[in-house]
Image (tube, rainbow, N blue to C red):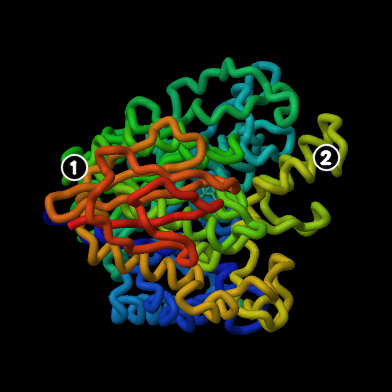
Amino acid sequence: MDRQWWQKAVVYQIYCKSFCDSNGDGIGDLPGVMSKLPMLKELGVDCIWFTPIYVSPQVDGGYDVADYYRIDPVYGSMDEFKQMLDMAHSLGIRVVMDMVLNHSSDQCVWFQESRKSKDNPYRNYYIWQPPKADGSEPNNWGNYFREGNGSAWSFDETTGEYYLHQYCSKMPDMNWEYEPLRQELYKMLRWWLELGVDGFRLDVFTRIKKPAGFPDTTKKPDPQLDRNGFVMDGTMCQCREGIHEFIQEMHREVFGKYDCYTVGEGAGVTWENAAGFIDLRRKELDSVYHFQLTSRFAPTFTLEKYRQVQSKWAEQVSKDFWPTQYLSNHDLPRQVSRHGNDGVYRVEAAKLLGTLIHTMPGTPYVYQGEEIGMTNVKYESIADYQDCYTVGEYHSMVANGKDPDVALEALRPLSRDNARAPYQWNATENAGFTTGKPWLKPNLNYQELNLETDRAAGEQSVFAWYQKLIRMRKTEPAILDGDMQFWLEDHPQVLMYTRSCPEQTMLVIANKSGEQSTLQLPEALAGKQWKRLLANRTDLEASLDRPRALAPWEVEVYSMA
Ligand code: GLC
Ligand code: CA
């Protein structure tokens, strides 16, 4: 079947701040990225997604953008950006930029103007509301970062009104109802496409449309995290009616005019409503990544849930509907720690999880460090954490009476710093990430776990496994085109599925557990000429002809032509 480039691609996510520092200031930068592009080429990825590298006060890791037209000097100059872009392109790697269109930094000139007076031309770029009669906030919404008194509104003395911020007071929400604001954003998006970037990852795009009249939420406060009667309720501003008009307009004004890939961060997107955003015939977005398997609130997914979610998305796959596959990113814990095993079975588990991602229908995403099986960090003190979620939630919990040690213990596994700790390049000081003082402490395990030691294992390395997975996307037709079917649907430990297209049937067997299991093929699959393509335990028996043991975290991929 004819496929779009981004359907055939593997995307690699770079969190620039933590990737590679070239000048010893402790912060990753574009020259650092350039020095590692050959490594990404070797890995085999087709596209890079850069988390925001625009000018930013870094209240939220760059998602608070102060100037949408400039690269933050800490990462490099615009010339260096163009150099990086050319270099990537010459290696056949495309570049997708993160775009934050729901809010900006309060340092953005648009907001600086907006707050000056009620009749400033930029006033309506943001969402302003008068206080209630008693002077209090316009409603009971809480902010995501648990900042200040907990409210999603901050009072601005100059004009005597409140402005809305779903995240924190330094990240005011933009007013999409106001056409000049929308045109301003479209102009900026076109500017980046003219510069040669290949697409956008759209930050929290499902939250750009707010409910008319800003009604109170009726959700009950969370006794641990909510304070002062302000309730954090993500659904108030999520997937609201009218959002599709905005996205269709953006497609008309921007995406449709270029060869440009768009992937939305789909908070609130499920298999039920996804087509509304990503059916290509609707001319909205190309794809979206959902949270149905990665919600912050469950330690990992059950196999039952995995089968259900993946089947429901897979059912809809067509030339016009294409999912994405990922288990980690800069907002989530390391996948091997959360969904796998970061102890004795770390390498096996890293390979197993990677295999799931790369053999399910959709475009696979690799988050930096995943290709060597990097793990969660465990900082001793709250002072070592930089993630505004972790810090904000910690202070809320302590204010609500939680013991500080207990609060930290509870927040550790979920902190976004797990993913943001510096890339582990080698065993030299600071993991080879910087010659200076890193902005965030490296994981203590970097001497044993780093790219160099991983690759020293040759064919057995996690890196080599990812190379194979990425190559298979080009050589095994079933990965792109195969229908997906689960087998052993009640099995508590083993995931088994086939991908079949006319040219090939692929079979994946994965023991997603730390316990040994037994493998017995269902009758319909038994007695066939299966050829083994991949196995993370090459020391164990490969035969599928009779029941046999499956080791903890064992994964195998077979093919039948
Ligand atoms: C998205 C980003 C996250 C950021 C938030 C607010 O969820 O991935 O890092 O904090 O949006 O911009
Ligand atoms: Ca630097």
Q: Mark 1 sits on what residue?
A: 318
Q: x%, y% of residue 13?
A: 45, 62
Q: Is residue 483 above or below residue 506?
A: above
State the image coordinates of residue 536 (x, y, percent, origin top left): 47, 62
State the residue in front, 444 or 499: 499
Q: Nearer the viewer, residue 545 or 345?
A: 545
Is 414 displayed left or right of 11 in the figure?
A: right
Above or below 120: residue 446: below
Q: Residue at x 62, y 35 (%)?
A: 143
Left/right of residue 371 with respect to residue 230 in the rendered view = left
Vertical side of 144 occupied by 532: above or below: below
For mark 1, give the secondary structure.
loop
> Which amino acid lies under the numbered mark 1 shown in the image of this protein?
Ser
Question: Is residue 371 placed above or below 87 in the rendered structure?
Answer: above
- Looking at the image, which residue is at 69% across and 83% down? 428
Residue 332 image point, x, y percent: 57, 49
Quadrant of the snapshot with the C terminus: bottom left
- In this view, the residue in front, 48 or 298, is 298
Residue 406, label in figure: 2
As shown in the figure, which amino acid type bears the numbered disc 2? Val
